[in-house]
Structures are given as C-alpha cells and as structure tokens.
Image (cartoon, grey):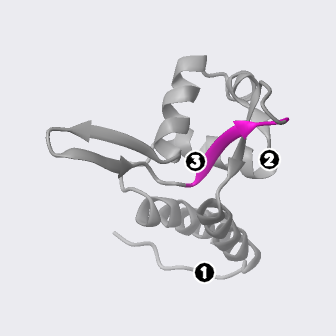
Amino acid sequence: MKEISHLFYVVEMFRNRLSRQLPTQHISLLLLVAERPGITQAELSNLLDMPQGTVSRNLKLLNYYLERDQCGSSAKGYGLLITRPLEEGAYPLGVFLTPKGEDFILDVVAELRSAPNTHALAC
C-alpha cells in the first residue's frame, strides 16, 4: 500500500519539523488555514468541532507568543500562523499562514505531489 506509506511519511514531516508530540488537531488546524486563508476562529471552531478555547490555545501554539519568566521573556510557538483583522482596525480576526507556514505547506504539497514515491517506514 504505497498510499499509506506516503501518508505516513507526510505525517512524519509534520512531527519531525514541528514536534514529535504534535497533536493531530494542530495538523488539522494548520491544513484548514492553508486551504482557507483568512478563516475566523469561530469558523475554525465550527468546522473542526472544537470549543473556541481549544482553537484559541492551538492557534497560540502555532503562532509566536512571548513567555515571561524571571530572566525576561522568550519567544515560543511554531510561528506558522498569524491572526490579523480582516479589515483595517476591524473585527473579526482572520487566521493566515506566515511565510514560514507557507514554506512548510509548500513542502507538504510537494511531497504529496511526488506520489507514487515510496518511503521506507521507520521503526
């Protein structure tokens, strides 16, 4: 089953480039934003059947955010998504890929298009 092997390889791309513990809901959210740039958090919540708070938390992790501690602050997150107003100074906020996110999605698309490549399953 070459298709399963190929799909496994693509999922491993996500895990290797982002995090070995990457939840599938992060993958779903990222792919949905790539498909629908400017989608709102409410639309994401509805389409993914996730509570609004869960969507917000996941967006925060897929974005950059500052975490403060005793030594100052440091940037956290994957830097793949950004939220910004859909219109100047207005709400709601839309969710978009960052340049880093666009590059990552282009790599995923290139891998999908390269089928019927076969990849050895890593154990």
Q: Is residue 89 above or below residue 19?
A: above
Q: Is residue 33 left or right of residue 17?
A: right
Task: Based on the picture, tell me whether residue 54 belongs to the magenta stretch.
Answer: no
| Precedes in sequence: disc 1 or disc 3 | 3
**Residue linked to disc 3:** 27
* Residue 98 % position (x, y): 64, 57
**Residue linked to disc 2:** 37
Binning the other alpha carbons within 10 Å of mark 1 as few (below 14), some (14 to 19) or many (20 upward) gives some
Q: Mark 1 to mark 3: distance in Å? A: 22 Å
> Residue lying farthest left?
70
The kind of residue tagged 3 is Ile
The kind of residue tagged 1 is Thr
For image coordinates 36% across by 56% down, the residue present is 20
**Residue linked to disc 1:** 118
The kind of residue tagged 2 is Pro
For image coordinates 72% across by 69% down, the residue present is 109
* Residue 71 % position (x, y): 15, 45
> Residue lying farthest right?
87
Asked which secondary structure carries label 2, the reply is loop
Do callouts 1 and 3 mark residues in contact (Cβ within 8 Å)?
no
Q: Nearer the viewer, residue 111 or 75?
A: 75
Do callouts 2 and 3 mark residues in contact (Cβ within 8 Å)?
no
Asked which secondary structure carries label 1, the reply is loop
Q: Mark 2 to mark 3: distance in Å? A: 15 Å
Asked which secondary structure carries label 3, the reply is helix
Foreground label between 1 and 3: 3
Q: Is residue 38 left or right of residue 111?
A: right
Foreground label between 1 and 2: 2
* Residue 32 % position (x, y): 73, 44
> Residue lying farthest front?
89
Please tell me whether the stretch drawn in magenta is mainly helix, strand or loop: strand
